[in-house]
Amino acid sequence: FATLLFGLIALCLTGCDGDTTTNVGKLTFQNELNIPPLLEPTVGSDGTKQFTLTMQTGTTEFFEGKKTPTWGINGSYLGPTIRVSRGDKVAFDVVNHLPETSTLHWHGMRLPAAMDGGPHQMIEAGSTWNPSWTIEQPAATTWYHPHLHGKTALHVYRGLAGLFLIEDQDSKKLPSNYGVDDIPIIIQDKMFNGDGSFNESMDLTPFGMLGNQILVNGTYDPYLRITSSQVRFRLLNGSNARAYHIGFSDNRSFYLVGNDAGLLPEPIKMKRILLSPGERAEIVIEFKEGEETILHSFAGKDGIENGEFDLVKLIADQRLTAATPLPQTLTSEPPIEVPADAKVRTFVLTTESAINGKKMDMNRIDEVVPARSREIWEITNKGWDHNFHIHDATFTILDKNGELPPKYERGRKDTVFIPSGTKVRLAVDFGSYPDPTTPYMYHCHLLYHEDSGMMGQFVIVEPGTESQVSQQLHQRP
Ligand code: C2O
Ligand code: CU
């Protein structure tokens, strides 16, 4: 009997319920939540912070006694957290110790296209890429991950991703003691084979991989000890396709303090926030001594919101460090306002993995955007669920199907969920680094869709030079 029971547990841990969409009731919250380490830079004589990131293969023990082949950055799964301040100069050695070409993209970063780490900045196996730039944007929770065209889903799924935090005077007024009251929460769904290896069927559903098990910061079945009466979570949906309706099992309220691209003007009290792949949110939660709750994802509509999951159990100590009240003004960054005669560009998404009927072509420039411009991008989804991310840009959502977006989506963003049948209008603030020959990407962040061609390219040019840009890029040697 014991053998049978053990066999059942072992099987169920690793996917005997392969087509279910919940883990509720199946977890025992046994493993302490991993906190990705902060990466220490070396500081050059001119103040440049120099970081080394090494992409490598390895194995990770998510389940006791099972070794899962994984990829990671400076480790076997995920990567370290990078934390810098607005105004810092940063430089990287991105070393590729993988058996194949990859790239490393800085999602949410405003920087020159040649530093962006998109599909054009390939890093061959055994080589090193050296991007550098100056951090010129407000505090935000950004992240990094590979972006090799056709392979992004697989590379991210195997474990290549990490957080990149930008701090400024405003963000330091929030809980900022990393790993203590400022906690990264990277949510990823997976599907495991019986031997503990990842099921790597990137085309498992029309959306790509929708897993039935959850890893938070690369930890299966996690708990977190809470030691302060006020804790900030930096939520990242680092999944390939799944969306999460995040809240707490006891239905408590929390404060939303930031979206993808930075802090809100003031905290907003709420109970649920929906995050699609690539989106981030910063929330602040208040705890009482000795209490317990579970960070939970509630089931939503069909499509990529259909699952229900326990994410991480939170156990407050009997004695908590008392916190100061949240500031009522979080940031004074002005809202993004578009001029009355702003250029409007329209995009249509369908069930084909294409944008405006076109599949991604590395040699085609789809849009030419003047530097520092503000435009309205109108995106209509006539297919199944998608989302939309624009590199090197910050936007706010003007409306969704003609109405103001929900409160949790009114801040500064770089990625937006566009459920089936939805039309969004975005007020987009574009970058300031003209380069007519190196494109930035816009794409669906359901990684299987992106890999299948749901991506387009735009260049940023000096205003007035738009007509001089060649629509064809020449293949690099
Ligand atoms: Cu997070 Cu173009 O990607
Ligand atoms: Cu999509």
Image (tube, grey):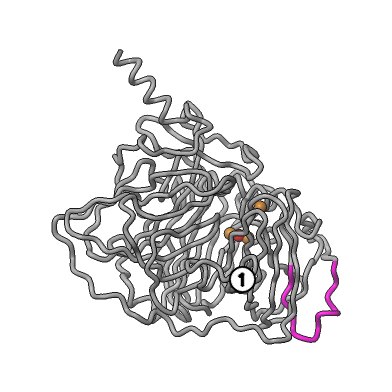
Residue lying at 51% horizontally and 53% vertically, measured from the top left: 238
Rendering coords of residue 369 (x, y %): 74, 77
Could you say whether the residue bearing mark 1 is in a helix, strand or loop? Answer: strand
Q: Nearer the viewer, residue 209 or 362?
A: 209
Residue 87 located left or right of residue 10? right
Residue 322 located left or right of residue 340? left
Q: Considering the image in quadrants, where does the C terminus appear?
A: bottom right
- Label 1 C-beta lies within 8 Å of the nearest ligand 2 atom: no
Amino acid type indicated by mark 1: Asp
Q: Considering the image in quadrants, where does the N terminus appear?
A: top left
Residue lying at 43% horizontally and 33% vertically, measured from the top left: 67
Q: Nearer the viewer, residue 115 or 30?
A: 30
**Residue matched to label 1:** 399
What is the span of residues highlighted in magenta in the rendered image?
A: 458-471
Residue lying at 28% horizontally and 51% vertically, measured from the top left: 293
For disc 1, the neighbor class at 10 Å (few under 14, some 14 to 19, many from 20) is some
Rendering coords of residue 454 (x, y %): 72, 54
Please give the count of numbered marks on the rendered protein: 1
Residue 160 located left or right of residue 66? right
Residue 466 on the magenta span: yes
Q: Nearer the viewer, residue 38 or 16?
A: 16
Q: Nearer the viewer, residue 449 or 160?
A: 449
Q: Is residue 19 above or below residue 172?
A: above
- Can you tell which quarter of the image residue 267 is in? bottom left
Rendering coords of residue 40 (x, y %): 39, 65
Rendering coords of residue 339 (x, y %): 67, 86
- Can you tell which quarter of the image residue 182 is in? bottom left
